[in-house]
Image (spheres, rainbow, N blue to C red):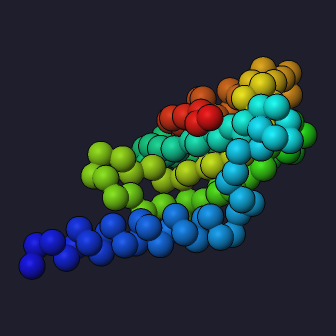
Amino acid sequence: MKRRPFLKALLAGLLALSCISTQAAPMTDDANLTNQPSCYFIVDVYIDEARGRGLYDRYIEKVKPIVESCGGQYLARSEKVTSLSPDRKPQRVIIIRFPSKDALETCLASKAYQDIMGDRTTSVDARALIVE
């Protein structure tokens, strides 16, 4: 049957999502604790094989403590990515939970982050989403 590959892919995707939610901190709205809901920062990273990773590995090492100092908690940070869409095939995906959108914006605007941002922007194509 032609439907089986689709069903297998759908089940694999659901299984992957359940693994993330069982291994990560609960993805709940913390409005009752901080008066602001949690905010999620999701990044797809596309690495050009011809250009290579450039300074991206240096960026990866330096960004984690900056994110954590702003209250960010990594829920997923992996190059083991299975795409269910032929048009979306990132080589790396990052999901970070921040206590609020303000905390995320503070992190991105910080001098420490601004100082290393060029290592990412000159090395890879990163596409980010903010989910509130």
Q: Quadrant of the C terminus?
A: top right
Residue 93, compared with residue 120, is above or below; it is below
User: Which of the two residues, 29 or 107, is positioned nearer the viewer here?
Assistant: 29
In the rendered view, does 7 fall on the left or right side of 14?
left
In the rendered view, does 74 fall on the left or right side of 111?
left
Numbered label tally: 0
Residue 108, compared with residue 15, is above or below; it is above
Q: Residue 80, percent across and down?
A: 53, 65
Q: Residue 89, percent across and down?
A: 39, 51
Rendering quarter of residue 69: top right
Q: Residue 12, percent across and down?
A: 40, 72
User: Which of the two residues, 23 or 93, is positioned nearer the viewer here?
Assistant: 23
- The answer to whether one can see residue 63 in this image is no
Residue drawn at (62%, 64%) of the image: 21
Residue 56, compared with residue 75, is above or below; it is above
Residue drawn at (70%, 63%) of the image: 24
Rendering quarter of residue 83: bottom left
Residue drawn at (58%, 36%) of the image: 131
